[in-house]
């Protein structure tokens, strides 16, 4: 799975292997990382796909998300990918990387 590789590289340090917010860096953060396994549960059983996408991307303020403690992955990815694929191609790659993460996090939801 591409999403699991992307998660391992970008999210695991803070959110942990299973997405519970207990990664190796979590203890050093002022604000505890979110438990990614309860996003659907906390949203009346519906996975908040667009909100998860926007939160990961970070280039648009997500209403109700509060202060941004998480990296703005959309910008970080674009910096990496635009050099290789150009501006428009880089944006396509950024969307693909974020979508893979969103789908992977959807798999982590508690039943």
Image (cartoon, rainbow, N blue to C red):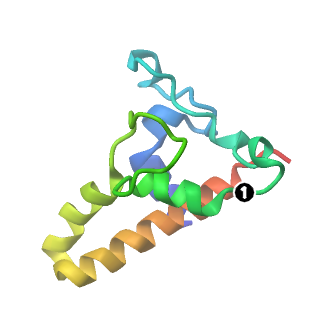
Quadrant position of residue 39: top right
Residue 19 location (% of width, % of height)? 61, 39
Residue drawn at x 57%, y 33% as measured from the top left: 34
Q: Residues within 10 Å of mark 1 (few under 14, many from 20)?
A: some
Quadrant position of residue 60: bottom left
- 5 to the left or right of 108: left
Residue 111 location (% of width, % of height)? 86, 48
Quadrant for the N terminus, please.
bottom right
Residue 67 location (% of width, % of height)? 41, 34
Q: Dot 1 corresponds to which residue? A: 47
Vertical arrangement, residue 25 with respect to residue 2, above or below: above
Secondary structure, mark 1, is: loop
Residue drawn at x 53%, y 35% as measured from the top left: 15
Residue drawn at x 51%, y 23% as measured from the top left: 32
Quadrant position of residue 68: top left
Vertical arrangement, residue 88 with respect to residue 15, above or below: below
Residue 69 location (% of width, % of height)? 39, 33
Vertical arrangement, residue 25 with respect to residue 16, above or below: above
């Amino acid at each position: 799975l591409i999403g699991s590789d992307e998660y391992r590289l970008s999210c695991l340090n803070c959110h942990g292997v299973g997405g519970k917010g207990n990664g190796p860096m979590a203890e050093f953060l002022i604000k505890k990382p979110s438990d990614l396994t309860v996003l659907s549960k906390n949203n009346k059983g519906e996975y908040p796909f667009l909100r998860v996408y926007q939160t990961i991307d970070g280039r648009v303020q997500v209403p109700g998300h509060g202060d941004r403690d998480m990296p703005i992955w959309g910008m970080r990815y674009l910096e990496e990918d635009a050099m290789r694929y150009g501006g428009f191609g880089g944006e396509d790659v950024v969307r693909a990387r974020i979508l893979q993460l969103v789908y992977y996090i959807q798999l982590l939801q508690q039943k």
